[in-house]
Image (cartoon, helix red, strand yellow):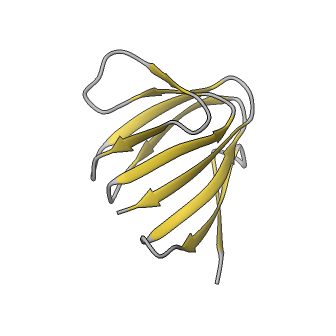
Amino acid sequence: MFKTNEYFDGKVKSIAFTTLEGPATMGVMAPGEYEFGTSTVEHMTVISGVMVVQLPGEQEWKEFNPFEMFIVPKDKKFRLRIAFDAAYFCLYL
């Protein structure tokens, strides 16, 4: 029914589930800097905290606050800087 995921020595944790729109995860990130790769298009919405993101092909970092969303294309890498615990919802399309 649900699948739990843990990355970066437990600093990033999520629960995977299926929505009407498709597969999704809800997760939390502890302070740190992370790089993720995608295998599908990812629509990530910040739920709480702040995520500073460097999207694929971009030199600049952009801040995303609660209820703001960013999209990462399929088969790309993106980087995140987290200063305080942050929560997110990610829809995989």
Q: Is residue 54 above or below residue 43?
A: above
Q: Quadrant of residue 46?
A: top right
Q: Nearer the viewer, residue 9 or 25?
A: 25
Image point 45% across, 32% down: which residue? 79
- Apparent side of residue 6 relative to residue 39 in the rendered image (left or right): right
Image point 69% across, 47% down: which residue? 28
Name the outermost residue toward the top.
60
Tell me the quarter of the image containing the N terminus.
bottom right
Name the outermost residue toward the bottom.
1
Tell me the quarter of the image containing the C terminus.
bottom left
- Apparent side of residue 15 relative to residue 37 in the rendered image (left or right): right
Q: Quadrant of residue 26?
A: bottom right
Q: Nearer the viewer, residue 25 or 9?
A: 25
Image point 52% across, 31% down: which residue? 80
Q: How many marks?
A: 0
Q: Is residue 30 above or below residue 38?
A: above
Give the image location of residue 36, x and y in percent.
45, 44
Give the image location of residue 30, x and y in percent.
72, 37
Q: Nearer the viewer, residue 56 or 44?
A: 44
Q: Nearer the viewer, residue 42 or 33?
A: 42
Q: Is residue 62 above or below residue 39?
A: above
Image point 36% across, 43% down: which residue? 71
